[in-house]
Image: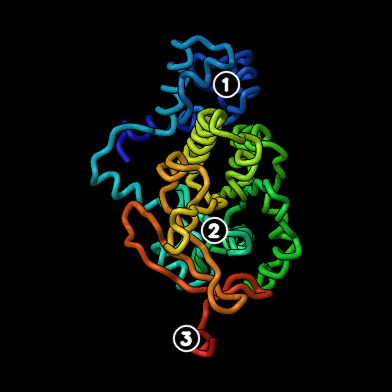
C-alpha cells in the first residue's frame, strides 16, 4: 500500500460516528438522529431535501452528504472497477437449488428482490426461510449475518423459524436472536421503522432486510383514484430508502407483494398483476411471480424481470421443513 493510500485509509477510519464528519456538531447530530440518520452510511445515501427536513440549511446539508460519501468512497468508477466492486456482492441461498439457479445463485445483496403472488403462494414461507439462510456460513450459501424483518400482515411465526433452523442444523435460540423483528401497524409506521433502521442494521451485522408485505398497508389506507398519486409518492420514497440501505450496508432487500385481478386478461397468464404499478416495477431489480401448481404443496416460481438474467421457471414444494426442491419422480406422480 502506497503512502497516499495509507493516509486515505487512516482518514477513512477517523469517521466512526456522524459527529466525526466536518460540519456535524453535537446539535446537528441530534437533529439528524431524530429523522433517522444514525450512521455515516445512511448519510452518504441521503438527499439534500431529506436533511433540510431536520432544519439544516441546504448548503450545510450538501457538505455533510459530500463528507459522508467521501468517507465511504462513493465516487465515479470505470466499468472495469465496477466489475471488481461487483465481486463484493453476496448471495443468499433460498434453500431450493432450482430457485437459486433461476435467480443466478441466490438472492443478491445491494438490490431489491420482489416476490409476488396470490394468498398461499409461499411468499411469507420464503421470507422465513431466507431469514434463517442468511445466517448460514458463506460456504453453505449464507452471509453469516442477521435479518431485519418488517411484518405488515402479522404472518411471522417463530415456530416456522424453529423448524427451518432444525433442517439446516442451526440452534434455534441463536437463530432467533439474529432476527430483528418489528410489526408495522400503518404505512407511516412501516416507513418510520425503515427510516430509523440504519443503526440497528450496523450494530447487528444485518445482511438481509425483509418487508412482508410491501404494499398491504398502502393498499388498505389509500383507496380511490384521488389518493393514488400520494400513495405512489410514498411507496417511491419508501423503496428508495430501502435500496439506499441495501447498498450502504451490502445487504439483500427482499419484499413481498400482493396481486390484483385483471378482468380483461381473465384467461391469460397475466390474469393477476402485482400491486404498486410502475413505481414498484421500476424499483425492484428482480421480480419473481409465485403461484400454486398441481398438488397442494407444489409451487412454481417464474422470473419475470431481471437486469441480466433470462426469464424462466423453477418448481419447489412447501413442507414442514420449509421450502425444498421437487424431485422429478414427484412431479411425474402428480
- The image's mark for residue 328 is 3
Front label number (3 vs 1): 3
Residue position for label 1: 19
Q: Earlier in the sequence, mark 3 or mark 1?
A: 1
Q: CA distance from mark 2 to mark 1?
A: 44 Å
Q: 60 or 53, which is in the foreground?
A: 53
Residue position for label 2: 117
Residue 16 in sight:
no
- The image's mark for residue 81 is none
Quarter of the figure with residue 126? bottom right
Q: Are marks 2 and 3 in contact (CB under 8 Å)?
A: no
Q: Earlier in the sequence, mark 2 or mark 3?
A: 2
Q: Residue at x 58, y 45 (%)?
A: 214
Q: Are marks 2 and 1 in contact (CB under 8 Å)?
A: no
Q: Is residue 248 left or right of residue 206?
A: left
Classify mark 1: helix, strand or loop. Answer: helix
27 shown above or below 203: above
Classify mark 2: helix, strand or loop. Answer: strand
Residue 199 spot, x, y in % from top left: 62, 36
Residue 330 spot, x, y in % from top left: 53, 86
Q: How many marks on residues?
A: 3
Residue 291 spot, x, y in % from top left: 53, 65
Amino acid at each position: 500500500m502506497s503512502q497516499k493510500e495509507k493516509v486515505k485509509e487512516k482518514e477513512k477510519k477517523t469517521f466512526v460516528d456522524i459527529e466525526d464528519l466536518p460540519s456535524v456538531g453535537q446539535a446537528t447530530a441530534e437533529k439528524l438522529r431524530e429523522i433517522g440518520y444514525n450512521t455515516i452510511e445512511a448519510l452518504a445515501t441521503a438527499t439534500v431535501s431529506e436533511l433540510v427536513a431536520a432544519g439544516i440549511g441546504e448548503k450545510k446539508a450538501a457538505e455533510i452528504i459530500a463528507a459522508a460519501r467521501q468517507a465511504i468512497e462513493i465516487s465515479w468508477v470505470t466499468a472495469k472497477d465496477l466489475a471488481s466492486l461487483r465481486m463484493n456482492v453476496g448471495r443468499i441461498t433460498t434453500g431450493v437449488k432450482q430457485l437459486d439457479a433461476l435467480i443466478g445463485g441466490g438472492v443478491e445483496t445491494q438490490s431489491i428482490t420482489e416476490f409476488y403472488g396470490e394468498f398461499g403462494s409461499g411468499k411469507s414461507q420464503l421470507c422465513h426461510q431466507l431469514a434463517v439462510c442468511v445466517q448460514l456460513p458463506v460456504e453453505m450459501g449464507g452471509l453469516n449475518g442477521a435479518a431485519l424483518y418488517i411484518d405488515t400482515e402479522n404472518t411471522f411465526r417463530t415456530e416456522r423459524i424453529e423448524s427451518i433452523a432444525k433442517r439446516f442444523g442451526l440452534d434455534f435460540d441463536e437463530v432467533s436472536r439474529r432476527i430483528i423483528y418489528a410489526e408495522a401497524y400503518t404505512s407511516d409506521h412501516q416507513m418510520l421503522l425503515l427510516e430509523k433502521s440504519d443503526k440497528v442494521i450496523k450494530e447487528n451485522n444485518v445482511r438481509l432486510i425483509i418487508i412482508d408485505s410491501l404494499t398491504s398497508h398502502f393498499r388498505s389506507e389509500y383507496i380511490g383514484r384521488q389518493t393514488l398519486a400520494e400513495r405512489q409518492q410514498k411507496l417511491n420514497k419508501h423503496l428508495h430508502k430501502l435500496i439506499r440501505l441495501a447498498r450502504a450496508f451490502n445487504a439483500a432487500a427482499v419484499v413481498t407483494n400482493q396481486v390484483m385481478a385483471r378482468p380483461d386478461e381473465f384467461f391469460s397468464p397475466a390474469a393477476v398483476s402485482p400491486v404498486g404499478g410502475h413505481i414498484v416495477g421500476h424499483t425492484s431489480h428482480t421480480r419473481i411471480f409465485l403461484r400454486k401448481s398441481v398438488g397442494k404443496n407444489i409451487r412454481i416460481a417464474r422470473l419475470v424481470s431481471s437486469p441480466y438474467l433470462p426469464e424462466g421457471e423453477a418448481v419447489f414444494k412447501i413442507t414442514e421443513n420449509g421450502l425444498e426442491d421437487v424431485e422429478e419422480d414427484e412431479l411425474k406422480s402428480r
